[in-house]
Amino acid sequence: MKKLKRTYSRCAILAAAVLLLLLIAGSFADLPISKFLYPGHESSFGQFFAAFGELPAFSLLAGCGVLLITQRGRFREELRVILLAGGICLTAASIFLAVHEATDNVPAMPMAVALLVTVFVDALTAFALLVLTRETQTKTLLRFLCTAIFVCIGIMLLINIIKVPWGRVRMRLIVSTGNESYFTNWWQAGTALKKRLVADGVSSDEFRSFPSGHTACAACAMLLTLLPTLYRRLHDKEPLFMAIGAGWTLLVAFSRLRMGAHFLSDVSVSALLTIGLGAVGVWLFYFNRTFFGKLWAFFSGEVPAKQAKKQEKNPDSEV
């Protein structure tokens, strides 16, 4: 556990440092950077990631849903029906949201194609998790499930809580109208401009630039660094998994700039939020013994060690 804490901390600090530098760059040069990167039209590269860039979050949730269904027998009997229902709902909702996002972001994409790609990636994810957790201790499995579900669902909620009321104009609207006065810095809410232009018939989606939902969900791929906790033979592979997750995140972030959907500061803040939420999740479920002890007692039915000692000293006391 100490090694995990050290490795995860180093990876998280390095990623956060890079993203902070990018955020600083975006704070001073968002508009000129987007002018350089956005060609004024969509590309196949950008459309691919617009459709499937968020899959890490959705597929990980689907994989966790399958684990809840197949591994529910490891937990207390009273919870097994709830875990079964929760697993089915989580898997179904993840598939539905992934397909909806793909077809909504790329309207020309047939729903059958989006569904096929989503189910294929979800199946691979679920199969990999089932193989990796065959010999995993139940406590470790619960830590992973809680962390992944907490981060993936949490970041989706957090992004939309910020994005909808913030109202930052997308680069593509600035280019299509030729009006650079619409540009605002990431720390400035564009509510007044949004109300005025939406009233004139502009789609409200053009005011959802900050932060980037695609980048935030893509950054969930960095939760791959937790896979070595499930399977011992993957120990020492955390940097490799972090590199894979960071690579996917960077590709998605770059594609969003190329599509004129976001600015550099948008994608930087989004990835930072995911990393921050990931740090909170890892601390809660891996390193906070008191919190996880209570959680484990709930799911397993075991009496916490401190409470067990009290019962031994006072056998007649009520639990």
Image (tube, helix red, strand yellow):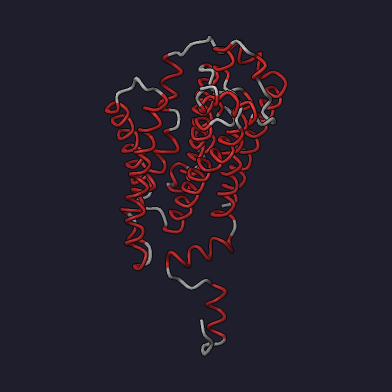
In the rendered structure, the answer to whether residue 14 lies left or right of residue 117 reads right
**Up/down of 232 relative to 168, above or below:** below
**Up/down of 250 relative to 313, above or below:** above
244 or 284, nearer to the observer: 284
In the rendered structure, the answer to whether residue 234 lies left or right of residue 67 reads right
- Identify the residue shown where x is 34% and y is 49%: 89
In the image, residue 220 lies at what x, y percent?
A: 50, 37
Quarter of the view holding residue 161 = top right
- Identify the residue shown where x is 56% and y is 87%: 314
Q: How many marks?
A: 0
Q: Residue furthest bottom?
A: 316
Quarter of the view holding residue 184 = top right
In the image, residue 40 lies at what x, y percent?
A: 52, 10
**Up/down of 44 relative to 72, above or below:** above
In the image, residue 24 lies at what x, y percent?
A: 71, 26
In the image, residue 108 lies at what x, y percent?
A: 34, 19
149 or 11, nearer to the observer: 149
- Identify the residue shown where x is 47% and y is 50%: 144
In the rendered structure, the answer to whether residue 186 lies left or right of residue 112 reads right
78 or 50, nearer to the observer: 50
**Up/down of 75 relative to 135, above or below:** below
- Identify the residue shown where x is 27% and y is 28%: 112
